[in-house]
């Protein structure tokens, strides 16, 4: 057996824009979203062994404590990723997975999906030529709609379909992001189940208005690609669902606005809210202030390069 281990950082994402288009007959929602990887990351260490899959999950030093724990068994997405990899590869061999969780769980930051993608990518290094890159994307899609984005090397994409059709775009650059997680989990399924499609335009455009009125100049200085797909409508359709149930989300946003954020929005199905700052100092000050009130607050930056 060839020995080997590999350590991979599994980054979180934020959704800079999320628009629900329609509900399909099979229950999935078609959407359009801009996803940006950020440098808050879980640490995934894989060690090649003779057979079997085992998983050890620990809370990272800066890990966010929410009251939703990560499953330590075969339902963990990292474990499931290894399972589908070996089924596809059809080879002898196994892996021990060590997962250091830094990304808050059930937070709209894609942590589980990113862990799964890191396991697929890591295993393809430990067991070269067993599973093609194209197959890895396919396997990722069977685990979760966001997994292919994390398997993909792009730092930012415009995703459509059910989130599986990816178009790389120029990532954010030169800005600071403050993440505020109010400390409770939100079920993505619950949010989608409670999202009602209307026949007209979605009336909820607070995020867009806030941004368009105040900060257009800074935003237009960002990449042309990103500006083209989101400047007219920087908002998150799911925000009204999650915020409707949890007023804390509006409070988190308000704090970030008061702290000088250029853009404030909920990520994915929430409840994590992010503020994007063009000033590092303001971001640091806002981070420190939010930390006085919330347990899970992070100062991070976008990943602004495409991995090779
Ligand atoms: P999504 O929007 O894809 O549902 P999220 O970013 O809101 O994801 P995750 O942190 O991925 O949330 O967790 C979603 C659910 O998946 C949680 O209920 C959690 O218990 C379960 N889960 C399974 N594996 C993992 C993992 N490796 N890390 C985090 N959560 C996991």
Image (spheres, grey):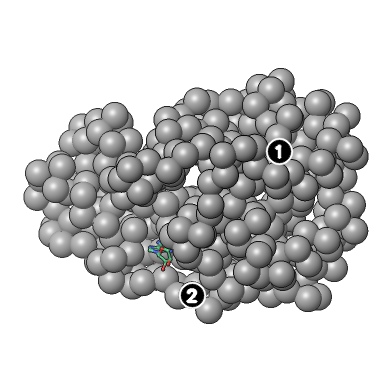
Relative to 147, say whether 188 is above or below.
below
Image quarter where ligand 1 lies: bottom left
Q: Nearer the viewer, residue 178 or 250?
A: 250
* Secondary structure type for disc 1: loop
Answer with left or right where residue 226 lies relative to residue 212: left
Q: Is residue 57 positioned above or below 116 on the image?
A: below
Q: Nearer the viewer, residue 263 or 54?
A: 263
Left or right of 222: which side holds 229?
Answer: left
| Residue 52 rendering spot, x and y as whole percentages | 15, 62
Query: Which mark is first along the chain, 2 or 1?
Result: 2
The residue that mark 1 highlights is 234
Check whether the beta carbons of the residues at disc 1 and disc 2 lie within 8 A of each other: no
Q: Quadrant of residue 91?
A: top left
Q: Name the residue under label 2.
A: 68
Mark 1 and mark 2: span between their CA atoms? 29 Å
Residue 6 in view: no
Dot 2: element: loop
From the viewer's side, name the closer residue of 44 and 81. Answer: 81
For the point 28% across and 60% down, the residue is: 79
Residue reaching furthest bottom? Answer: 67
In the depicted structure, whether residue 281 falls above or below residue 18: below
Q: Residues within 10 Å of mark 2 (few under 14, many from 20)?
A: some
> Residue 68's spot in the image, x, y percent?
49, 75
Query: Left of 68 or right of it: where is 243?
Result: right
| Number of the label disc, if any, that sits on residue 7 | none
The reply to whether the residue tagged 2 has its Cβ within 8 angstroms of ligand 1 is yes
């Amino acid at each position: 057996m060839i020995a080997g281990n590999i350590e991979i950082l599994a980054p979180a994402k934020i959704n800079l824009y999320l628009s629900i288009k329609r509900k399909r007959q099979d229950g999935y929602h078609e959407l359009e979203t801009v996803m940006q990887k950020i440098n808050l990351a879980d640490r995934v260490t894989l060690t090649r062994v003779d057979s079997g899959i085992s998983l050890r999950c620990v809370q990272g030093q800066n890990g966010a404590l929410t009251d939703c724990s990560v499953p330590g068994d075969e339902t963990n997405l990292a474990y499931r990723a290894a399972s589908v990899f070996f089924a596809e590869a059809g080879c002898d061999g196994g892996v021990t997975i060590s997962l250091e969780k830094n990304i808050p769980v059930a937070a709209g930051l894609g942590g589980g999906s990113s862990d799964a993608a890191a396991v697929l990518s890591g295993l393809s290094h430990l067991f070269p030529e067993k599973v093609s890159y194209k197959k890895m994307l396919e396997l990722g899609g069977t685990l979760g709609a966001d997994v292919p984005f994390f398997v993909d090397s792009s730092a930012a994409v415009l995703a459509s379909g059910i989130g599986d059709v990816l178009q790389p775009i120029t990532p954010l650059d030169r800005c600071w992001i403050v993440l505020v997680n109010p400390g409770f989990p939100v079920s993505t399924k619950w949010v989608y189940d409670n999202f009602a499609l209307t026949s007209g335009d979605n009336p909820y455009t607070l995020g867009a208005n806030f941004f368009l009125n105040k900060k257009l100049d800074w935003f237009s200085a960002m990449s042309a690609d990103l500006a083209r797909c989101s400047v007219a409508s920087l908002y998150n359709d799911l925000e009204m669902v999650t915020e409707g149930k949890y007023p804390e989300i509006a409070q988190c946003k308000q704090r970030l606005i008061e702290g000088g954020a250029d853009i404030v929005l909920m990520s994915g199905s929430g409840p994590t809210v992010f503020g994007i700052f063009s000033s590092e100092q303001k971001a640091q000050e806002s981070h420190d202030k939010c930390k006085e009130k919330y347990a899970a607050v992070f100062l991070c930056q976008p990943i602004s390069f495409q991995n090779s």
